[in-house]
C-alpha cells in the first residue's frame, strides 16, 4: 500500500446551480487525470474542458511530418503539450524535441504533465523564449528534421478570466501570453491615438467598424475612464453597435468582440512581427528534406505563412509546399468548435541547399 501524504484539506469553491459556471469552480475539469469521465463527457458535448487544450489536426500533422525514431524536432508553441506528446510518441524513445513557449505558468504545468507520462528532459527540452529564436536553437543542435508551429492562443489561456483573453467573462484586460513581460492591452489603450487604434483593428482583424470603435474607445479614455477590464471593452462595443437592426445585433456584436480582442492580442504580443521573423529564419533551421507544418487561425497569419512558403518554393528553398490548405475534418470540428477556423499549411526543405 502506498503511504498517504498528509495534505491540508482545502475547501472547494461552492457554486449555485447544477453545473459550474466559473473557471475556478470547474475543479473536475482542472484535474483531468483524476476525473476522466467528466472530461470525456465535456469533450463529447463539443466543448473544451476548463484548463485544457484539445490539440487540433493531430493525425494530419503526423501524416505529413513522417517522424522517425532518432530525429530532432522543433515545436514552436508548446502550450498544453498535446501535439508535443503525439510527436514524442513517434520517436519511440530515440531522438529529441525542442519546444518553445513564452508562457511561464502554463509551460511549467506542461513540463510536469509530460514528465509524468514518461517524456523527461532526455527527450524534451523546453525553452522559455519566443519561437522566432528557432535559428539560435537550430544552431546548437544542428538543425531540425521536422518543425510544427501551432499559432494562436491555447484554450487554457482563453478560458482563464485572469488572462483577459475572452470577452465572455469579466477579468483584467491583459491579453499578454507572458504576463511578466511587456505591457497589457489596457496599458496599450491608455496612450493610443484614435487613428492608430482604427488602423490596428483593421490591419489585425479586418474589423469593418474600426473607425466607430476607435472613436468610442479613445473618447472613453479621454474622459478619464480607463478601459481596463474585458467587460468595459465589451460594453463599449455593445453601445457603439447599438444602431444595428435587432435581428443582426447579437451575432454582429459577438463577432466584433472576437475581432477586437484578437487585434489587441496580436498587437501586445507582436504576433505578426514574431511570425514574420520565424518564417524568415525557418529555412535555415530545417535540415535538407526537413518538413514543416503550420496551423493558422485567422486570415492575417495565413496570408503571411502562404506568401513566405510560396516565395521560398519559387526561390528553390522548399522543394514543395501546400498550394491548398488542409482543413480539419467535419467530425473534428463537431467535437471541437475551436478547430473550425484552422488551416494547415506545409512545406518540404529542398535537398540541395540554395543561398
Image (spheres, rainbow, N blue to C red):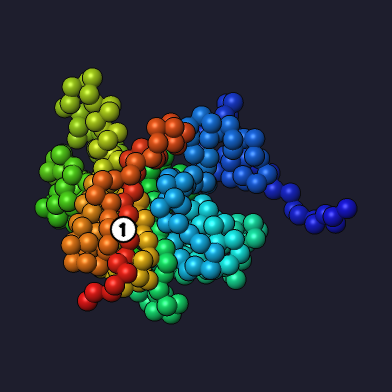
Q: Residue drawn at (80%, 56%), measured in percent from left and top?
A: 6
Q: How many numbered circles are shown? A: 1
Q: Residue 45: x percent and y percent?
A: 51, 29
Quick one: label 1, few (<14), some, or many (20+) residues within 10 Å? many
Q: Residue at x 36, y 55 (%)?
A: 293
Farthest residue, direction top: 247
Q: Quadrant of the C terminus?
A: bottom left
The part of the image, by quadrant, that contains residue 18 is top right
- Residue 153, position as x, y percentages in the image: 39, 51
Q: Position of residue 26 (x, y in %)?
A: 57, 39
User: Does 317 sit above or below residue 323?
Assistant: below
- Residue 353 placement, left or right of 70: left
Q: Residue furthest bottom?
A: 140
Q: Nearer the viewer, residue 9 or 31?
A: 31
Residue identified by numbered label 1: 347
User: Based on the displayed image, in which of its 4 quarters is residue 135 positioned?
Assistant: bottom left
Asked whether residue 81 is in view, the answer is: no
Question: Could you tell me which secondary element the residue under label 1 belongs to?
Answer: strand
Do we see residue 66 in this rendering? yes
Q: Position of residue 10 (x, y in %)?
A: 69, 48
Give the vertical position of 177 relative to 354 (above or below).
Answer: above
203 vs 181, left or right, is: left
Amino acid at each position: 500500500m502506498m503511504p498517504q501524504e498528509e495534505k491540508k484539506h482545502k475547501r472547494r469553491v461552492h457554486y449555485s446551480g447544477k453545473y459550474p459556471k466559473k473557471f475556478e469552480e470547474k475543479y473536475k475539469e482542472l484535474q483531468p487525470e483524476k476525473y476522466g469521465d467528466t472530461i470525456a463527457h465535456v469533450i463529447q458535448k463539443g466543448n473544451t474542458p476548463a484548463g485544457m487544450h484539445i490539440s487540433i489536426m493531430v493525425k494530419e500533422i503526423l501524416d505529413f511530418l513522417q517522424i522517425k525514431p532518432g530525429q530532432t524536432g522543433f515545436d514552436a508553441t508548446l502550450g498544453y503539450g498535446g501535439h508535443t506528446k503525439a510527436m514524442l510518441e513517434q520517436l519511440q524513445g530515440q531522438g529529441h524535441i525542442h519546444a518553445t513557449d513564452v508562457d511561464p505558468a502554463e509551460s511549467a504545468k506542461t513540463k510536469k504533465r509530460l514528465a509524468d507520462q514518461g517524456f523527461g528532459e532526455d527527450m524534451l527540452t523546453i525553452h522559455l523564449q519566443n519561437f522566432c529564436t528557432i535559428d539560435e536553437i537550430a544552431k546548437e543542435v544542428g538543425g531540425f528534421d521536422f518543425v510544427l508551429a501551432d499559432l494562436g492562443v491555447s484554450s487554457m489561456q482563453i478560458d482563464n478570466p485572469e488572462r483577459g483573453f475572452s470577452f465572455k467573462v469579466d477579468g483584467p484586460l491583459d491579453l499578454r501570453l507572458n504576463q511578466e513581460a511587456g505591457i497589457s492591452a489596457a496599458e496599450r489603450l491608455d496612450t493610443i491615438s484614435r487613428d492608430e487604434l482604427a488602423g490596428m483593428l483593421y490591419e489585425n482583424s479586418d474589423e469593418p467598424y474600426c473607425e466607430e470603435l476607435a472613436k468610442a474607445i479613445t473618447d472613453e479614455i479621454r474622459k478619464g475612464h480607463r478601459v481596463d477590464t474585458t467587460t468595459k471593452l465589451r460594453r463599449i462595443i455593445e453601445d457603439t453597435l447599438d444602431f444595428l437592426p435587432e435581428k443582426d445585433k447579437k451575432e454582429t456584436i459577438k463577432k466584433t468582440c472576437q475581432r477586437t480582442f484578437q487585434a489587441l492580442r496580436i498587437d501586445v504580443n507582436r504576433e505578426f512581427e514574431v511570425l514574420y521573423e520565424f518564417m524568415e529564419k525557418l529555412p535555415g533551421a530545417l535540415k535538407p528534406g526537413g518538413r514543416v507544418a503550420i496551423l493558422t487561425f485567422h486570415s492575417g497569419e495565413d496570408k503571411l505563412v502562404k506568401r513566405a512558403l510560396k516565395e521560398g518554393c519559387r526561390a528553390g528553398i522548399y522543394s514543395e509546399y501546400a498550394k491548398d490548405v488542409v482543413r480539419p475534418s467535419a467530425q473534428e470540428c463537431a467535437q471541437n468548435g475551436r478547430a473550425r477556423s484552422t488551416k494547415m499549411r506545409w512545406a518540404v526543405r529542398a535537398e540541395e541547399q540554395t543561398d
